[in-house]
Image (cartoon, grey):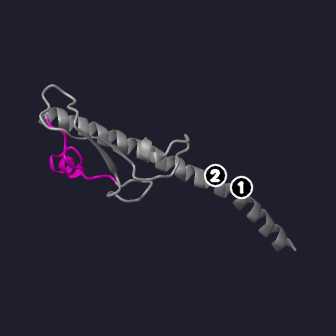
Amino acid sequence: MELMIVMAIISVLATLAVPSFIGAIKSAREAVLKEDLSVMRAAIDSYTMDKQKAPQTMDDLVQEGYLRSIPVDPMTKSSDTWVTDTSDALHSLDQTEPGIDDVHSGSQETGSDGQPYSSW
C-alpha cells in the first residue's frame, strides 16, 4: 500500500514537472536562435561593409573569417536549413554587388510570440 502511495506522488510530481521542462527547453532554443540570427546578421553587415559587396553564400562568411562555422539552427537541428534573403538592392554607396542581406530559420513552427521562426 505504501508503495502505491509513493508511486502516485511521483506520478503527480512528474505530471507537474514535464510541461515546465518542455517550456524551458523551448525558451532556451528560442534564445539560441535569436543570438545566432543576431551574430549572423552582424557578420553579413560587416562583410558587406568591409568587402563592398554582400556575401553570395553563408560559406563566404566562414571562408573570410567573419564566422568560425555556420551555426546549427536550434529549431531544425541542422546548419543547412538556414534561409537566406537575397536582394538586388545595394545597402551602401560603396557596395558593388548585391547578395545575401538577411537570414532566417528554416523552421515553420510557431514561436512563443505567435510568429513563425522563419519570420524572426
- 106 or 38, nearer to the observer: 106
Crowding at dot 1, Cα within 10 Å, few <14 / some 14-19 / many 20+, comes out as few
> Marks 2 and 1: CB-CB under 8 Å?
yes
> Residue 16 — which label?
1
Q: Is residue 22 above or below residue 52?
A: below
For the residue marked with disc 2, what is the amino acid? Ser
| Residue ID at (55%, 40%) | 113
Q: Is residue 20 left or right of residue 84?
A: right
Residue 103 at x, y percent in the picture: 33, 44
For the residue marked with disc 1, what is the amino acid? Leu
| Residue ID at (14%, 32%) | 95
Q: Main secondary structure of the magenta part?
A: loop
Highlighted magenta segment, given as a residue range: 53-71
Crowding at dot 2, Cα within 10 Å, few <14 / some 14-19 / many 20+, comes out as few
| Residue ID at (21%, 35%) | 46
What secondary structure is marked by label 1? helix
